[in-house]
Amino acid sequence: MSDLQLCLMADEVEGFQTASVSSGQDVVADAVAEAVGIFRAALRTAGAALGAAGTLPDELVGAAMDRAALKFLSRVGGAVSETRKTLYRDSEAIRRDVAAGKLICAAPDEADDAAAATLAPSIAARTPTIDRAHQEGL
């Protein structure tokens, strides 16, 4: 959560602290998990190697936290400034660039083997079927 705290502006910190101590659902964790998931999906779309579950390359942490901050503020009823909206739009542009393969991130130290397995192509030999009906006229 410290990445999110670093991303928040001074007037947003109060909302963060209030939501952190209130009982019920963990709004902060939900917002961060959603943002990380969206950026991991963009990496997966681009065919990039993913690190351990729930992690992002360092280049994307700031953009993901900007996205999480807006979602967090929306959920707790905090005021969303124009600066925050601009940061969110910038993070969306970065996410689109990652998904399109325009922004290449450093490969993780340890790749997520499960994610890499889902991206591996499956190639199988095709066996031709030859029977009397297909040989007529030859």
Image (tube, helix red, strand yellow):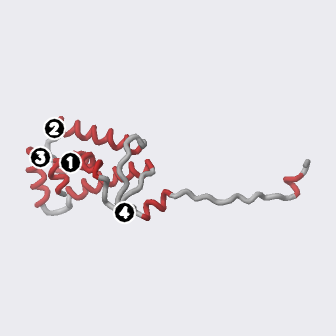
The kind of residue tagged 3 is: Glu
Write down the residue under mark 1: 69
Residue 136 pos. (x, y %): 90, 51
In the displayed image of the protein, which residue is found farthest to the right? 137
Whether tag 4 and tag 2 are in contact, CB under 8 A, the answer is no
The kind of residue tagged 4 is: Glu
Mark 1 or 4, which is nearer the eye? 4
State the separation of the CA atoms marked 3 and 4: 35 Å
Residue 44 pos. (x, y %): 42, 52
Whether tag 1 and tag 2 are in contact, CB under 8 A, the answer is no
State the separation of the CA atoms marked 3 and 1: 9 Å
**Disc 2 residue crowd, few under 14, some 14–19, many 20+, Cα 10 Å:** few
Residue 112 pos. (x, y %): 39, 62
Write down the residue under mark 2: 81
Closest to the observer: 56 or 105? 105
State the separation of the CA atoms marked 1 and 2: 11 Å
N-terminal of the pair, mark 3 or mark 1, is 3
The kind of residue tagged 1 is: Ala
Residue at position x 23%, y 58% in the image:
29
Residue at position x 16%, y 38% in the image:
81
**Disc 3 residue crowd, few under 14, some 14–19, many 20+, Cα 10 Å:** some
- Kindly indicate the quadrant of the structure image that contains residue 93: top left
**Disc 4 residue crowd, few under 14, some 14–19, many 20+, Cα 10 Å:** few
Q: Secondary structure at mark 4?
A: loop
Mark 4 or 2, which is nearer the eye? 4
N-terminal of the pair, mark 4 or mark 2, is 2
N-terminal of the pair, mark 3 or mark 2, is 3
State the separation of the CA atoms marked 1 and 4: 28 Å
